[in-house]
Image (tube, grey):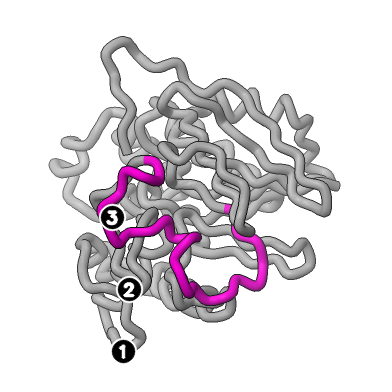
Amino acid sequence: MATYAIGDIQGCYDALQRLLEKIRFDPIQDRLWFCGDLVNRGGQSLETLRLVQSLAIHSTVVLGNHDLSLLAIAQRTEGEQRRVNADLQRVLFAEDRELLIDWLRQQKLMHVDHSLGFVMVHAGLAPKWTIRIAEARAHEVEAQLRSDGYRKLLKNMYGDKPVWNPKLTGPERFRAIVNVFTRMRYCTPSGRIGFDDKGRPGTQKPGMYPWFEVPGHAPRELPVVCGHWSTLGLFMGLGVYCIDTGAVWGGKLSALELGPELRLHQVPGRAMPTGEKAGD
């Protein structure tokens, strides 16, 4: 039995199929962890969602910023939905769209497995959050997404403010939690996120630190597996395993086999169309 954490797929279905073949995934005994951003830009988001949803009993998914964006767009008018890119439109106007969207809305922001000894999030953790505190914050948003209040949460989800503060309430509290789990790369010791800083360490503004290197951060009781930061590339250190290796940007799709002895498995990602440039 093996557990594999898989980095950002972003609609690269063919790469995911190659990866599952390479690791010889056996649904009878193996488990898959998906680090979020299942969809967008790769051209095969519909196929990716269908495959991962079909593996639901064998897998664990945390939501990424692109997944939450899809959920939010799904609540808009048909006219607005037809203005998004063709990859997402294929999901939004698919015959099984409701099944896929409802399933996606039930997924987590954070997964903690004490027996295996690992945590999974999409982007990062706030400097002052222990694993226990972070899990409690994630549960707040997960409960709202799974309740009748999900439309209000998704409608008010966008925005760079406020900075996380435990005294926040309502939509601002949910927005700050979502930003930490799905958008964080750099932040200050107080937890202010550098949303405009997206490059490799050394390119950020003064006073900003990679979230996992912030001075004085709370102790992380378990190692953290995450994605989101394709320009960082593969990073394994400080109790953090960043495995977004840019599959959608012509890089690789990575699977980290979790356990006492870590093993990395990779396959080529999507072939970049001529003229397309890597982005967020």
What residue does disc 1 label?
167
Q: Residue furthest left?
A: 79
Secondary structure character of the magenta stretch overall: loop
Q: Tell me how far mark 1 sits from mark 2, CA to CA.
A: 12 Å
In the image, taking residue 265 as reference, residue 51 lies left or right, namely: left
Q: Nearer the viewer, mark 3 or mark 2?
A: 2
Residue at the image point whose x is 65% and y is 46% from the top: 5
**Disc 1 or 2, which lies upstream in sequence?**
1
Locate the C terminus by quadrant: top left
**Disc 3 or 2, which lies upstream in sequence?**
3
Q: Nearer the viewer, mark 1 or mark 2?
A: 1
* Circle 2 crowding by C-alpha within 10 Å: few under 14, some 14–19, many from 20: many
Q: Amino acid at mark 2?
A: Phe
Q: How many marks?
A: 3
Quadrant position of residue 224: bottom right
Q: Secondary structure at mark 3?
A: helix
Q: Amino acid at mark 3?
A: Ala
x and y percent of residue 184 in the render? 38, 57
Q: Which mark is residue 72?
A: 3
